[in-house]
Image (cartoon, grey):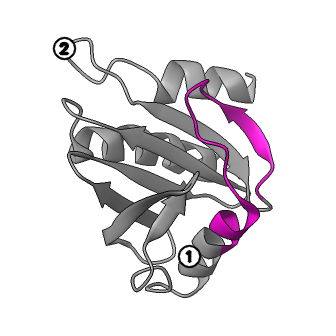
Amino acid sequence: MSWQTYVDDHLMCDVGEGHALTAAAILGHDGSVWAQSESFPQLKPEEISGIIADFDEPGHLAPTGLFLGGIKYMVIQGEPGAVIRGKKGSGGVTIKKTGMALVFGIYDEPVTAGQCNMVVERLGDYLVDQGM
């Protein structure tokens, strides 16, 4: 299965009542894009390095916030070293780290944080199980 299929079929899927994530992507730890939805923001190198630093040292992003394509998200409770969650208004982001990749999901209402978490973390856990 191609990486784009994972994004299209597993991340940008219907999460209930015909709603889906706003944007999604799978990136390598080096920031290289493996696959992304058309709406996924262009990330800056310093945004990727900040995310990797937060996985290595949980809490790194808390003072400054999490930035994706220049948009700031407030970092909220995640799973240290495994999941980073961010909130911005009625939307937010979930990032799951696997052995080789970062799985991103961005959402806005009516999609909830819980729905985004479930979609992103389920795919991330699957990739971890596959050695990815």
Q: Which residues are magenta?
A: 31-49
Residue 46 in which image quadrant: bottom right
Front residue of this view, candidates 127 and 59: 59
**In this figure, which residue is indicated by the disc labeled 1?**
55
SS of the residue at dot 1?
A: helix
Q: Quadrant of residue 70?
A: bottom right
Please rate how many residues cluster around mark 1, counting C-alpha atoms within 10 Å: few if below 14, some from 14 to 19, many from 20. Answer: many
Return the x and y of residue 27 as percentages of the image width and height.
70, 48
Secondary structure, mark 2, is: loop
Please determine whether, in this image, residue 16 is positioned above or below residue 72: above
Look at 42% across and 73% down and name the residue there: 65
Any part of residue 132 in sight: no
Q: How many marks?
A: 2
Quadrant where the N terminus sits is: top right
Magenta-colored stretch includes residue 8 = no
- Residue 72, visible in the rendered structure: yes
- Residue 57 position in % (x across, y down): 55, 88
Q: Residue at x 55, y 28 (%)?
A: 39
Local packing at callout 2 (Cα closer than 10 Å; few below 14, some 14-19, many 20+) is few
Q: Tell me the residue that label 2 is attached to.
A: 17
Question: At label 2, which amino acid type do we have?
Answer: Glu
Earlier in the chain: of badge 2 and badge 1, it is: 2
Which residue sits at x=47%, y=79%? 61
Per the model, the C-alpha gap separating discs 2 and 1 is: 33 Å
Please check the rendered image and state whether residue 33 is part of the magenta-colored stretch, yes or no: yes
Whether 24 is drawn above or below 54: the answer is above
Residue 101 location (% of width, % of height): 69, 53
Pick whichever, 46 or 7, lies toward us: 46
Is residue 42 found left or right of 107 in the rendered image? right
Measured from the top left, where is residue 9 in percent x and y?
Answer: 53, 18
Inspect the image, locate mark 1, and give the three-letter code of the amino acid beneath it.
Phe
